Amino acid sequence: MAKYPGTEELALVGTRTIFPLGPDSCLVITHLQFTRNPDQNQLSVRINARNYDQVAMYAGDIQFDRELEEDEVIRINLILKSKATRLIAAGQKEWLYPERRIRRLGWAIMDDDWFLLPNPWKIRFGSSMTVGYKDGSSWSADEYGYHPGHPLYKNDPARRGRERNTWRLGQQKWAKLRRGKSLARTYEHGDEIQDRIMFEYLESIMMKKRES
């Protein structure tokens, strides 16, 4: 784990950003490209990586109400401590030393159970966003930030086909790794439908095992 700042690369596919929101909650931001294929090379440069741009997001896609287990909280605390440059704080003294209780050391296994990954069953496979203004003008971008007029704007159906396949495979692997864990919710209608589909998938696996 490298010290912040200086080595964190937001341009990399697998980079996650953790914002503490309070003593009991945090926000984890994950690149779209990684959610569509969690098994890809996390150190590769993501599509259309950039530091500054006019952007928009749909708040309904934010996942919330997922309860982390103690071991997962300790891992997040270790990540935050490892990135601290000067001061750290905690409600109890023992919480200042997550490394004493951690079972996973090193990035290779820190997230091997995908606990930092959002629930892929509740990620829309959207393609673009358009915003209209009162003066009649508009702003548009596809899922990777390309704007109308750019030669790559919504212009790679082969890639989208591959990503749809890896996204489905990621959903299946996430369901297996996170079996029995707390599920996230969103403001989108149909949350319970996605939960049911995931449970039915897991049940189909169990039935195949019993039959074999």
Image (cartoon, rainbow, N blue to C red):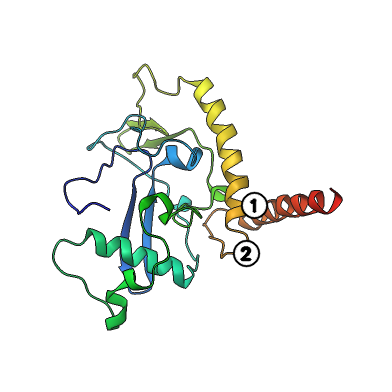
Q: Mark 2 to mark 1: distance in Å?
A: 15 Å
Q: Mark 1 points at which residue?
A: 194
Q: Name the residue under label 2.
A: 180
Q: What element carries label 2?
A: loop
Indicate the quadrant where residue 154 lies: top left
Q: Position of residue 188 (x, y in %)?
A: 55, 53
In this image, 80 relative to 104: left or right? left
Q: Earlier in the sequence, mark 2 or mark 1?
A: 2
Q: How crowded is mark 2: few (under 14 residues within 10 Å), some or many (20 or more)?
A: few
Q: How crowded is mark 1: few (under 14 residues within 10 Å), some or many (20 or more)?
A: some
Q: Position of residue 114 (x, y in %)?
A: 49, 53
Residue, x 38% and y 31% (percent of image)?
141
Q: Is mark 1 on a helix, strand or loop?
A: helix
Q: Residue furthest right?
A: 211
Q: Where is residue 116 in the image (x, y as percent from the top left)?
A: 44, 55
In this image, 173 relative to 44: left or right? right
Residue, x 32% and y 65% (percent of image)?
78
Indicate the quadrant where residue 149 lies: top left
